[in-house]
Image (cartoon, rainbow, N blue to C red):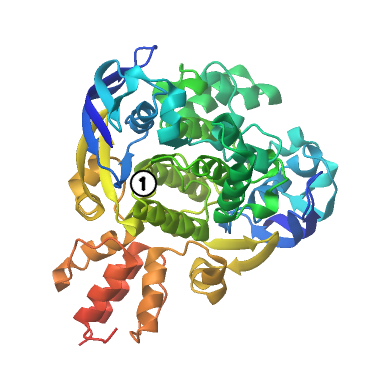
Amino acid sequence: MTVIEAKGLTYTYPGGTRRALEDVSITIEKGEFVILTGPSGCGKTTLCRCLNGLVPNFYGGKLEGEILVTGLKVSEHQIYELARHVGLVFQNPENQLFALFVEKDVAFGLENLGVPRDEIRKRVDWALQMTNIENLRERAPHELSGGQQQRVAIACVLAMQPDVMVLDEPTSFLDPLGAQQIFDVISRLNKELGITVVMVEHRLDLASRYSNHVVVMDKGKVVLDGEPKDVFSSEAARLIGVGIPKATRLSQVLEMSGVRLGRVPVTSEEASQVLKEVLSRD
Amino acid sequence: MIEVKGVSFTYPNGVEALREVSLTIHDGEFVAIMGQNGAGKTTLVKQFNGLLKPTRGEIFVDGVNTRKVSVATLARKVGFVFQNPDHQLFCETVEDEVAFALRNFGFEESTIKKRVAWALNLLDLTEYRETSPFMLSGGERKRVALASVLAWNPKVVVLDEPTIGQDHKQKEKLRQFIVQLIAQRKTVIIVTHDVEFVAECNSHVVLMAQGKIVAKGSAKQMLTNSALVTQASIVSPQITQIFLELADLGMPIDLINIHEAREALLNFLEVDS
């Protein structure tokens, strides 16, 4: 089942001098874990904002083309309606958190939707537990470290149990171990609850293992769209400057030196497996 | 260049962020401070330009005790780029933003012009000269913040999470750029979680956990030591992880970047590189 379908999206921010999106078309199936990557300023964040209607409803300007999310035409629905289906975790958690207590922030979206009190309590507990921040429940979000705030922001969206979670560099402030834990959490939500994940990410060394679909953007356009190993091993990815996982990159430099590996590794496990075979070949 | 002597720091809310930290950073050294979220990394570097003063202990920057001088005076020596660029950007155009500190420091207008053009060019921002910083993407705003600090040519450059939101090309530029700064005998201190970036840079590494310094050494020593890596809540570079699995076959286990890995493999396979 298709959850996100974008056709010919073109958009310029009011006052902007160039197109943030140019003829963007993508199709995302239910249950996919999509990594959206590309050079800074390539339109990744703008595309995320289209998925829940922030572009153009909040940012203004005219969005050409058509986008359907969970069957809803984004242009015909309000942001609050779309919020039930699409949860967006912002790049900068400070822009998303505002309550005096973490718990209140996580409950906010649910309260707005008029979810019964008991249910709110249950979902808040669950979201705090999933993101491992139960101990921060009564802390003020603005006093937390960047990484802790990022977890709170994810918990806020998690609590809404959306069909699609859109995360704009959700672990950028986290230490690598913390990032891995968050990726694990997101991956679990993806696998167990079937939530479709669209994640903007540059740290492909850490994130690639979780993904089955990679979209690369450059200058407002989608330039690569496919399976991780195909996208990462393409010449175009290297030229655009995508942070190709070291496992894939290593296999490329070896191939260039005449060492045949036979397949393209994306994770470190895959790479060591391939290399073991090569090293014990003779 | 920077001497931290037995520094402890407690925030007004009672959180003890630094405990008895001692550290020497030499002139022209490139140090990456790494460690768990909340380990005290940012608190430590904020002491270097006097934004925070030690609760106990002392810090000397270029021989000057940070307690004895104002932040403004220290700022000439120590340029600081915050984790979140929005905390330091406020002007209406990128150009004004980069010129702001230079004007404050009283540089001549002609010098300012040159410096601004240089910094914008260096960070690939020339096309945004007249754009509002707030129209830019997160990664671009980060570069504006960096340009505004580099423009006044401080002796010490502190970059708090410089690679966040930066794509691969920008990171590579940043790396080359840091190499240049080091060649000019500037001291560069970065706070980062980006293990792969540090592995590429091959800088010195200071690992922190719970307000203390756990270890200091070369990137190689620090990032391939699995006990230290775990203690600091980071993960080894992907290359290190790959080679750990190849140890049985006689491969070295202290590799951190692609170049080393390629060389080791080609040597083993006796392929001419």
Residue B109: image x %, image y %?
64, 40
The chain carrying label 1 is: B
Residue B57 location, quadrant: top left
Q: Which residue is mark 1?
A: B186
Q: Nearer the viewer, residue A64 or B18?
A: B18
Horizontal arrangement in the rendering, residue A40 relative to residue A176 (left or right): right
| Residue at 19 percent of width and 52 percent of height | B221
Residue B235: image x %, image y %?
31, 49
Q: Nearer the viewer, residue B217 or B58?
A: B58
Check disc 1 and report its element: helix, strand or loop. Answer: loop
Above or below for B244 versus A280: above
Above or below for B180 versus A48: below
Q: Is residue A89 visible?
A: no
**Looking at the image, how many numbered discs can be counted on the residues?**
1
Residue B82: image x %, image y %?
48, 35
| Residue at 38 percent of width and 64 percent of height | A246
Horizontal arrangement in the rendering, residue A144 relative to residue A220 (left or right): left
- Amino acid under disc 1: Lys
Q: Is residue A24 visible?
A: yes
Residue B178: image x %, image y %?
40, 52
Q: Which quarter of the rendered picture does the C terminus of chain B lie within?
A: bottom left
Residue A277 location, quadrant: bottom left
Q: Which quarter of the rendered picture does the N terminus of chain B lie within?
A: top left
Above or below for B175 versus B245: above
Residue B251 location, quadrant: bottom left
| Mark 1 surroundings: few (<14), some (14-19) or many (≥20) residues within 10 A | many
